[in-house]
Image: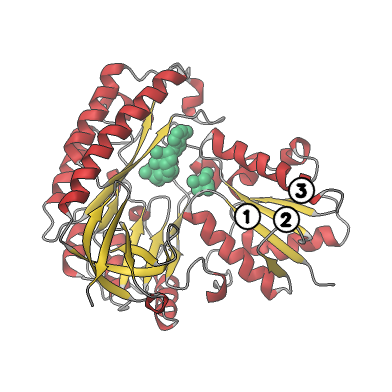
Amino acid sequence: MSSKRVYIETFGCQMNVADTERAVTRLRASGYDILDSPESADILLFNTCSVRARAEQKVYNRIGETLKKAGKVEKIIGVMGCVAQLEGDSIFERAPKVNLVVGTRAVDRLPEIIGRVLDGEKRASDLGERRLDEGLDISPAERHSPYVAFVPIIEGCNKFCTYCIVPYSRGRERSRSATAILSEVNRLHADGYREVHLIGQNVNSYRPSNDVGLENFTGATPFSRLLRAVAGTGIARIKFTTSFPRDFHPDIMTAIEEQQNLCDWIHLPVQSGSDHILRRMRRGYNADYYKRLVDVIKQAKRPVAFTSDIIVGFPGETDEEFEQTLKLIEHCRYDAIYIFKYSERRGTPAAKLTDDVPSDVKAARFQALSSMQKTIQGRIHKSLIGKTLDVLVEGESAKSALDMTGHSTCHRVVNFSGGHSLAGRVVQVRVTDAKVNSLYGELMN
Ligand code: SAH
Ligand code: SF4
Ligand code: F3S
């Protein structure tokens, strides 16, 4: 086969980033070249997200845009990821130029699927299951960073929150074996990675089919045992996301207190402060339950940053119910939040409800929440001035080539002036100035 040049674009969450890394590893091993821009590529791949209507629209716009730029040159076009899994072969009708549809669990088979098209099939699709621990490891060359690596520990979701498409696009929860996870982290450690992010739609729902690899570790749940086991590899920093409130056991905090390399950051999306809305979202907890978790996190022996996702304008959300969300945000004093306007997703239970909160009301609620959070975040950031944070230097700052940037253990963006030779090192930075979304400081060591 002649050398084929592939360009791949990734949308959506870290799971898609990790899938792209696996896909590229497999493609290169099968003799493909991977390019940084679409112009001279023969094969264009789009790894897509479907979580909100806008995310999905963006993908179709991007395919159109890229094809227009390519002009008359024939290219093979492939759609991967969540849109591919959900829409399947109907994508061929909606976007007739598309030749491949590759579901969320078929990424490892990408070379075979492309091969089918190269052998003459006009259209090829694969929406089959993943062979979990069988897949090739990700080659370090294909990771999104030489210092920070994403390590999937669980895929899929069984929660079926009424608004959410993920259980349909990612299928049921499947946990990777602890031995596979630990050997990946050990290898990353040996290859010089400083930080791993254990990722999954709900990491703390981790439930492997057997105990192998965890026998020597204690913990109230398989997830907190896994945390201790990963800490035991000795890698410098471990973060994990996302945590699901109903499955959040306080032992996670005990593990963080015990193990210095488990970072001081928890992402624990609440979605709403109203019990009525939470019930209709089918989140499986109420505001009081969530507040008790907040207490556990805030009482930890070392301070732990915590962040959240909120949906505004869920069907039927009244002004009073939205007020309860504002109150909860005030109570939680989050270190950061991600706010989303409710977006109806076809096939979810909430799609049967009328999306009756007008878009200007959704926009106003978004604004109100965002400005409240800005005030809270501003205050928290001001209080950090004078404090010293451990920062993993990830590269040059986007704003100024004289500055370097990285994340603290509490997952804040920290900029400081320093040389490029610091990249990949964990340094101490004393905070001297604070913006709403980032911190500035001076190098200490
Ligand atoms: N498993 C995680 C969330 C994964 S999806 C959890 O349950 O917390 C990431 C975020 O997208 C969600 O937390 C939610 O805030 C948002 N989201 C999901 N579906 C949405 C929808 N239909 N409309 C608006 N926001 C949505
Ligand atoms: Fe979606 Fe709920 Fe699963 Fe999170 S827990 S991925 S919001 S269904
Ligand atoms: Fe999007 Fe799929 Fe992730 S819908 S958020 S890419 S799981």
Q: Is mark 2 in CB contact (under 8 Å) with mark 1?
A: yes
Q: State yes or no: Cβ of the residue under disc 3 lies below 8 Å from any atom of ligand 3.
A: no
Numbered badge on residue 44 = 2
- Give the structural element (helix, strand or loop) at label 2: strand
414 with respect to 31 (left or right): left
For residue 111, say whether it is visible. Answer: yes
Q: What amino acid type is highlighted by mark number 2?
A: Leu
- Residue 244 to residue 174: above or below: above
Disc nearer the start of the sequence (2/3): 2
Q: Earlier in the sequence, mark 2 or mark 1?
A: 1
Secondary structure state at the residue bearing disc 1: strand
Q: Quadrant of residue 26?
A: bottom right
The reply to whether the residue tagged 2 has its Cβ within 8 angstroms of ligand 3 is no
Residue 111, picture quadrant: bottom right
Q: Amino acid at mark 3?
A: Lys
Name the residue type under label 1.
Glu
Q: Residues within 10 Å of mark 2 (few under 14, many from 20)?
A: many
Disc number at residue 432?
none
Front residue of 178/200: it is 200
Name the residue rendered at 19%, 40% in the picture: 332
- From the viewer's perspective, tell me whether residue 306 is left or right of residue 80: left
Ligand 1 falls in which quarter?
Answer: top left
Q: Which residue is mark 3?
A: 69
